[in-house]
Image (tube, helix red, strand yellow):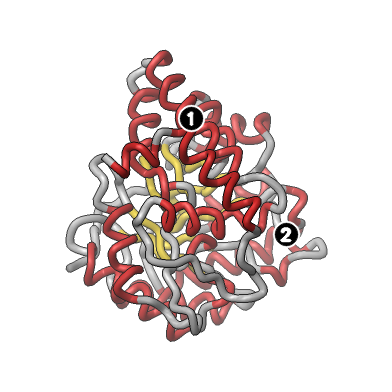
Amino acid sequence: MGRFTDFVPKGVIPATLLALNEDYSIDERSTRKHLADCALVDGVTAATVNGHASEIHACTFEEQRRILDISLEEVGDKVPLVNGVYADGSHEAQRVAKMAHDAGASALLVFPPQSLGMGGVTRPECVIQHFKMIAEVTDLPIIAFRYPVASNLAYSFDILLELFEAVPTIRAIKDWSNDAKVHEAHIRTFQSLPRPVNVLTTHSAWLMSSLVMGAAGLLSGAGSVIAPEQVALFRAVQNNDLAEAKRINDRIYPLQQAFYSDPFVDMHNRMKECNVMLGRMPKAVMRPPLMKLSDAELARLRAALGESGLLMQEAA
């Protein structure tokens, strides 16, 4: 078990879920199995823990450290692990980043601080200082999470260019711009810089379109269910095999539509339920305020799994 010191964020990177017991404690055995199911798929280049998909908003610092530790124990000698840095204050972000560095993570996924809402992200000095403070305590490659404008936490194109210049360890962005025009500009510009910054798409509801634009990879919660299909789609696009890419996209389309329907907040809840239906997880427990899905929605998810062929594939 050790850090992958030459890791550059690119390719297919699933963001994994967190299995929970009925009392909301971490189900370590099921979490380990789920992580291995995703991370050890042939063609996966890394796996992400302590991100949105693993309910980072509801995890204490000690739980985050434990999640990373068991993840490293399970797959850390086989695949690089990306650890999320989710904190409203820069000093707390430093503490999480240093913990991840010391434990053996191979890269960091840095979320925008919620404290920079209400216009804070329009001040370059605020954004740059946050990332500089993280880079002071670790030389791990950083993936900057770029949110959509509607979140009030989106870094502008120009601020991102300033940020890349100020913090050289930023090697990629996780692009959730939700804007095809902006997304393509990111891909064309950032990946062509003298010191390239890879664009990892998280536009999983329109993944094929995004990959065809030329994204260097994807970092996606949907990989917690369809990592093999994401690898196949990425490979087909990389090989300029449009017919194969369309065939794979047709398979995953029903699930993409189901995962990312309104209310958007339930996307990872839906992914957990699908893993239960596929026999990969024993139960789908979410920490409040996230709540159990309705019977009608569970039926829609089962139908989407059927359309995708995954139910039949898992049974076989």
Q: Quadrant of the C terminus?
A: top left
x then y, percent, for residue 4: 23, 58
x then y, percent, for residue 39: 29, 53
Q: Is residue 145 left or right of residue 264?
A: left
Does 40 appear above or below 115?
Answer: above
- Asked which secondary structure carries label 1, the reply is helix
Residue that numbered label 1 is attached to? 211
Q: Earlier in the sequence, mark 1 or mark 2?
A: 2
- Asked which secondary structure carries label 2, the reply is helix
Q: Is residue 173 left or right of residue 13?
A: right
Instruction: Give the alpha-carbon distance from disc 1 to disc 2, as whole Å.
Output: 27 Å
x then y, percent, for residue 165: 53, 51
x then y, percent, for residue 31: 35, 68
Q: Amino acid at mark 2?
A: Val
Q: Amino acid at mark 1?
A: Leu
Of the pair 2 and 299, the residue shown nearer to us? 299
Of the pair 31 and 22, the residue shown nearer to us? 22
Q: Residue at x 18, y 62 (%)?
A: 77
Q: In the rendering, which numbered label is found on residue 121? A: 2
Q: Quadrant of the N terminus?
A: bottom left
Mark 2 nearby-residue class (10 Å; few <14, some 14–19, many ≥20): many
Q: Is residue 147 left or right of residue 175?
A: right
Q: Is residue 192 visible?
A: no
Q: Residue at x 43, y 42 (%)?
A: 195
